[in-house]
Image (cartoon, rainbow, N blue to C red):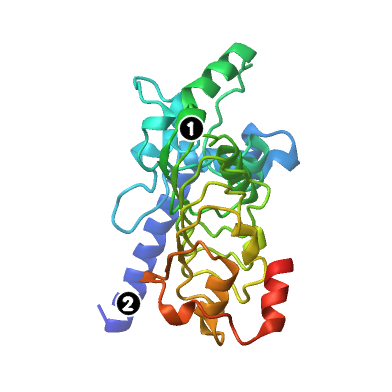
Amino acid sequence: MKPGGLFFHLLAMFKSSLDQSTSSREETCPSNTSCCSDPRESHICSAFLRKRVCPPYSDCGISSSLPSDSYKFLTWCNIEQHDIQGSQLHCPRIRKGPSEECLLSRQVGCTLAPKKRVLEKNKWEMWLQENWEDCKKLNISFQDLGDPYQVENFKRILRRLIRVEILWLVDNSLVDLHTIRLPSCRVLNMSKNCVTSFKQLPKIPQIQQLSLAENHIETLAGLSSLRNTPLESLTLKRNPCEFHQNYRKQVFFCLPNLKILDGILKLPEDCSPPEDNIFSKSCILS
């Protein structure tokens, strides 16, 4: 056989095997019209069929679905065989799954369980199981709050922390928490967030140690809102306001009870009033 004839012969064999694999795949995966009479639901049904019958293709031969996918949108208090309450969690993930309509709109390829009617008694038991009201120490950092419903659920948890004394909210992309009140909080760490003003902080009347490092606070306006608190230690490192002239003098002038700023004890030169009297008046009145 000539080299050219051999090439066309191999090409014909490859095309024949490709047609056979395509026909067998069509037999395994029925078309959309065979299971969906409504054309508007065809794209949803096709997504379900691809998930149920035809596993997603992977170069390594492993399906993309994980064993934990069945718990993807479940809260920890809905998982069976556990006796842990919310106040006993060291670093929980405050997440809330999207609604069924949102899942369908995103074309998530998974079957949804039928919606069950939740009685008021069950809701109350779930509320007690979370037990955020009795929590005194809590670390809910690194929550990756990417969607609005996650942010709202996160704030819902914060409103229930009426007895928390030590709270860590590091790297949560938080912007504004002025509607939140933490009446018993003594230590608050809000480093690596997106706070731009002291007016966006939660109400913390008993605060003693506050860390706002690596935020976006440009001015010290609103700092006097912490004047009547027992604040002793304040951290503002890696904020734009740190590079202002007489930065330490301005902070200690607004907060006379403050003892430590950015990890450094109050120095004698920090006790003198700042030269910018205009800023001092605005700091007191703001």
Q: Is residue 41 left or right of residue 239?
A: right
Q: Dot 2 corresponds to which residue?
A: 7
Q: What amino acid does circle 1 point to?
A: Leu
Q: Residues within 10 Å of mark 2 (few under 14, many from 20)?
A: few
Q: Dot 1 corresponds to which residue?
A: 74
For the C terminus, give its image quadrant.
bottom right
Q: Is residue 95 left or right of residue 60?
A: right
Q: Residues within 10 Å of mark 1 (few under 14, many from 20)?
A: few
Give 167 or 151, whichever is nearer the viewer.
Answer: 167
Give 227 or 171, whichever is nearer the viewer.
Answer: 227
| Residue positioned 66% across, 45% down in the render | 105
Which corner quadrant of the image does residue 149 belong to? top right
Give 245 or 30, whichever is nearer the viewer.
Answer: 245
Considering the numbered disc 2 on the image, is that residue within a helix, a strand or a loop?
helix
Q: What amino acid does circle 2 point to?
A: Phe
Q: Is residue 138 left or right of residue 47?
A: left
| Residue positioned 41% across, 58% down in the render | 18
Considering the numbered disc 1 on the image, is that residue within a helix, a strand or a loop?
loop
Image position of 24 with respect to 146: above or below:
above
Q: Position of residue 209 (x, y in %)?
A: 44, 56
